Image (tube, rainbow, N blue to C red):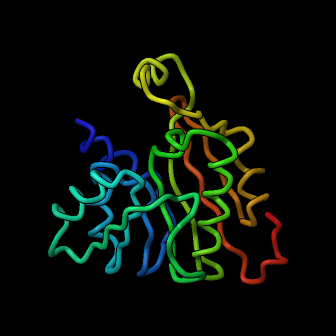
Amino acid sequence: MWRNVVETHIIPWAFEDVELGAKILELGPGPGVTTTCLGGLTSDLTCLEIDPESASTLARRMAGNGVRVVAGDGAAIPMADSIFDGAVCFTMLHHVPSVVLQDRLLREVIRVLRPESVFLGTDSVASGPSRLFHLFDKIAPVNPQDFSERLRAAGFANVQVDVRRHEFRFRARKPANRGDQVG
């Protein structure tokens, strides 16, 4: 059921009118449902997963598909500066356990993106059903009302946050010139 939601709803909505380029970073793929969809959209996909067991399982599952899976923390991305054409994360930011760590992740994403690259994703809006779904998880829901400001504070420009009833999507761009942070 989740795969169907990802393929027919989340990915098309997130990518609507956006192209990321060839070399993409996916943050927090978990079991890799979104990774499978992304594999068809790019020729060079790197996934960064904080849970070593999930990373290992995903690496085995994606073997031979040209997808690189790295075990690591999005708040301390173990990769060089300015190497990706785009970055994505889908329904995972609320699993980063604090606003401080979420903001650190945003700063790390902009660090590894090339100038003018896009960061996009989706997350759920805090609600009764989402709290029930995550009853025993440690989560830090992301408030879409102030997420634009958080993206700008991390250095992103051309920020857009669109909210639906149970979810929101965001798009932001690393400026060509880090001093150009309007929008």
Residue 110: horizontal and vertical position, in percent?
64, 69
Image vertical order of residue 166 relative to residue 117, above or below: above
Residue 113: quarter of image: bottom right
137 shown above or below 72: above
Badge count: 0
For the N terminus, the quadrant is: top left
Position of residue 15 measured from the top left corner of the image (x, y, whole percent): 46, 60
From the top left corner, tell me how far across and down residue 22 is, in percent. Answer: 41, 81
The residue drawn where x is 37% and y is 62% is: 71
Residue at position x 43%, y 73% in the image:
24
Q: Residue at x 72, y 83 (%)?
A: 176
Q: Quadrant of residue 60?
A: bottom left
| Closer-to-camera residue (53/96) | 53
Front residue of 106/6: it is 106
The quadrant of the picture occupied by the C terminus is: bottom right
Give the percent coordinates (x, y) of residue 165.
54, 29
Q: Is residue 163 left or right of residue 150?
A: left
The answer to whether residue 19 is left or right of residue 2 is right
